Image (cartoon, rainbow, N blue to C red):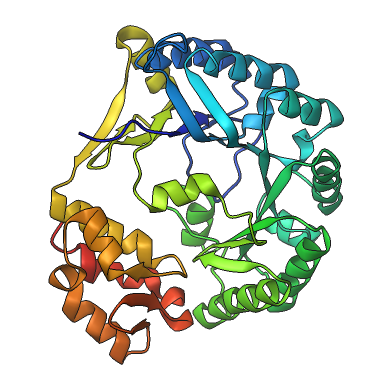
Amino acid sequence: MHAPPRHVYVHVPFCRHRCGYCDFALVAGRDDLIDRYFAALARELERLPPVSAAACLELATLYVGGGTPSHLGPDGLRRLFDLLRTRLVPVAGAEITVEANPLDVTDAFVAAAQECGVTRVSLGGQSLDAATLRALDRDHAPDDVRAAVGRLRDAHLTVNLDLMTAAPGQTRAAVERDLDAAVALDVQHVSVYCLTWEKGTAFDAARRRGQLAPVDDDLERAMFETAIDRLEAAGFEHYEVSNFARPGHRCRHNEAYWDLRPWEAFGPGAARFDGRTRITNHRSPTTWMKGVLAGGECVGDVDAMTAAAAARERLVVGLRRRDGIERRAFRAASGHEIDALAGPAIARWVTQRFATDDGNRIRLTRDGLLVSDGLWADVLADR
């Protein structure tokens, strides 16, 4: 019997503009669908007991992502949270995150976020360099990022700033300037992602036509090492491959994912997890709306893992974290021994200096983190 989830993700699929690298579940320029989205979300939420019930869902974290949730505007944000409150009860001190585009962060939006109980805003800045923003097909300017952070910090909201490296034409010096600018903004959390060329995106099509080119692998690595060095020197903890936090400001919602605690999820493309089975909604926002309104749910994929497969996934997400994995804790949580699952792979990583193993705790080294995506096939092979 799995414990009831205390973490919820809600996907808002609307954007003003789809960036060229984006393959997320969203629609751009379709605000005519917002009312239908709310109707479908209300229907999907009916699988939870109402807040008046003894079994109502009490939340430690709530994460509203997208898309661009801030595109709903102040009134739309209030409407969303009024709906969520019919089924969700955040506990005292809950972490409540909303993703936002810098252009949307007006004084009115910040006031609405405070009214809704938001404690943390994840800002899709991506860069504070005008040339890099143009290369990434973003619709805001560096000063928009600075103004948004200023408003959020003045309201005493925790701020995560997303930064992207390996953008077309980006230099290592430009990355260094971005990192210095982010530190100067005094945000509490920074997420750093290397650009990925997802199949089906406008960037991928332009790459195949020879109009865009990825940065060199060595430069991409140097950019990410620069991010680690600059942010750690500024007092940030590098606590997961892509995530850096001031002490006390790690993202508690993401840590629930990485601990494989059960969570609920609503909206197109959203995936819920009960500790063993991951159920992912249909990615198409319009298909999801139609299916939910017709039958209460619209599932695109079901991944029912065996106990061993769930343990292997726990090993992978655990090793993405700088704290690594402690053998006894892993056995207690999964019922499996690490060495029975991946002993030869771990020994090989230690020999290659991709990991350290003191007999109790296994951690990836910096070199291991930088190539981590290429390591997991050995662990997940028997899923």
The answer to which of 144 and 134 lies nearer the viewer is 144
Name the residue at 78% across, 58% down. Answer: 128
Question: Left or right: 147 with respect to 276?
Answer: right
**Can you say which quadrant of the picture contains the N terminus?**
top left
**Can you say which quadrant of the picture contains the C terminus?**
bottom left
The answer to which of 299 and 203 lies nearer the viewer is 299
Question: Relative to residue 19, is residue 196 depicted above or below?
Answer: below
Q: Residue 38: x and y, percent?
A: 53, 14
Would residue 138 be seen by someone viewing this image from the given angle?
Answer: no
Question: Left or right: 299 with respect to 338?
Answer: right
Q: Residue 147: x and y, percent?
A: 86, 45
Q: Total of numbered circles in the picture?
A: 0
Would residue 369 be seen by someone viewing this image from the given angle?
Answer: yes
Residue at the extreme bottom? 351
Name the residue at 40% across, 77% down. Answer: 364
Q: Residue 98: x and y, percent?
A: 62, 36
Q: Residue 209: x and y, percent?
A: 50, 59
The answer to which of 217 and 61 lies nearer the viewer is 61
Question: Left or right: 145 with respect to 302?
Answer: right
Question: Relative to residue 350, is residue 125 depicted above or below?
Answer: above
Q: State which quadrant residue 91 falls in.
A: top right
Name the residue at 30% across, 77% down. Answer: 360
